[in-house]
Every structure is written in C-alpha cells, then in structure tokens.
Image (spheres, grey):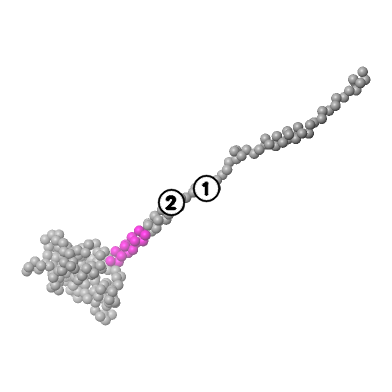
Amino acid sequence: MNKCHNYKPKPKKRNASQGWQKQRSALLTFQPRQHGIIRRSSPTEEFKISPLFVSRVIAAAMAIRFIIITLIWFAVFITLLCNNEVPISSREGYCDQCPNDWICYRNNCYQFFNENKNWKQSQASCLSQNSTLLKIYSKEDQDFFKLVKSYHWIGLFQTQANGSWQWEDGSTLSPNHLTLVEMQNGSCAVYGSSFKAYTEDCSALNTYICMKKAVLGLH
C-alpha cells in the first residue's frame, strides 16, 4: 500500500539526437524566399542604346549642321551680291585698281545696278561712268556670274545690216564664249542663269551690269 502511494513516475529522458534533428529540420525549412525578392535592374540595363542608333543620330546632326552653314553662307553671298559688295579676289592682283564700290575680277571691274532700264538707257548709264555693258570674253569669265539668277542687260545686240550678233566694241559673238538662246523677237540680249544669254526686246526693262578695265595706279 505504501509502495503504491509513494510511487513517482520517472521523467522521460529526452533523446538528444531527436531534439537536434528537429532543430536542424527547423533551420533547414527557414530559408529566405529568393523568389519573393524583387531585383531592380540598373538604368543601363533597363535602357540600352544601340551603337548603330547613336551613329545615325550623330550623322543626322552633322548633316543638318552642314546644311544650315551652307544656307547661311549662301544667304550672305546673295545679300552682298545684291548690295554690290561681293568680295571676289582678282587672280592678277588688280583689285585695288577699281573705283570704289566696283568689284574686281580677272583684271576687270564690274558694277551691278539694281535699277530697271531699257537697253539704250543701260548703255548710256554705263557710258556715263566710263564703262560699257557686260561683255563675256571666255568661259572662265562666266565663273564670276555663276550665282546670278536674275536677268541683266549685256552689251550684245543684233545688227540691222546682216542680222549678226556683236558686242559694243564691234566684235562678233563667239559660240565658244557664250550661248545665245532665242526666246522672242528681240535685237538685244540679257545674261541669265546656266551661263547663257537670251534674246530680249530692247525696250524691256531690266537690271544691268557695267564693266571696265582695271586701271594701273588708280589709287
């Protein structure tokens, strides 16, 4: 009887190996959720510029810059041409021997007049300044007028005697120097674009170009 009353159950001994296995399994099961982490890419990875695209942008920018510069220089040249101030150098070095406001080129002095006159009036205006209307001596002379777009009276006219074309100094027109295009029934000529002269009614109103030889020791 006393033995039954004083009986105390013995505590169960914990198996050390089993406890360690539970802790190990718990550590193994607690792993960070790699798939739940949001990885942000760098700006260079999000937006990558193709080298081909960059080269095309640079080429386009350079082309636009070239066009703008060309247009600016062309506008400046046309403005100076209209104002009779085209700074063209003479190959022979006679540019300092022309009157003020005249343009020197290849030992000749030129003046562009923007006022409209008929052929006779233009001729008289040039004579009053000791000059003549423009005469084309060679193809090389036309390089000076390659940017001329409007029509100007020149010293070329048709004789009444035989209908031939000659210059004011009496020399005949050479097709090797200038091409004459018959546009209408006219006995005078204007100089236009494309290195050509065009027939014109002498009573028509046009601008004109005067020329004279450079004089040695003018200044």
Compare residues 21 and 57 and report the one nearer the observer: 21
Which residue occupies 45% across, 52% down? 51
Whole-percent x, y for residue 107 in the image: 25, 75
Residue type at mark 1 is Glu
Whole-percent x, y for residue 149 in the image: 24, 62
Distance from Cα at disc 1 to Cα at disc 2? 17 Å
Q: Residue 216 is drawn in which quadrant?
A: bottom left
Is 46 displayed left or right of 55 in the figure?
Answer: right
The label shown at residue 45 is 1
Whole-percent x, y for residue 53 in the image: 43, 51
Quarter of the image with the N terminus is top right
Quarter of the image with the C terminus is bottom left
The answer to if 75 sits in the magenta stretch is yes
Which contiguous range is marked in magenta? 66-81
Whether residue 113 is visible here, answered yes or no, is no
Which residue occupies 90% across, 23% down? 6
Q: Earlier in the sequence, mark 1 or mark 2?
A: 1
Name of the residue lying farthest toward the bottom: 217
Compare residues 2 and 144 and report the one nearer the observer: 2
The answer to if 217 sits in the magenta stretch is no
Whether residue 82 is visible here, answered yes or no, is yes
Name of the residue lying farthest toward the top: 1
Q: For the stretch drawn in magenta, what is the main secondary structure? A: helix
Whole-percent x, y for residue 151 in the image: 20, 63
Which residue occupies 16% across, 71% down? 124
Check the image and report above or below for 185 versus 216. Answer: above
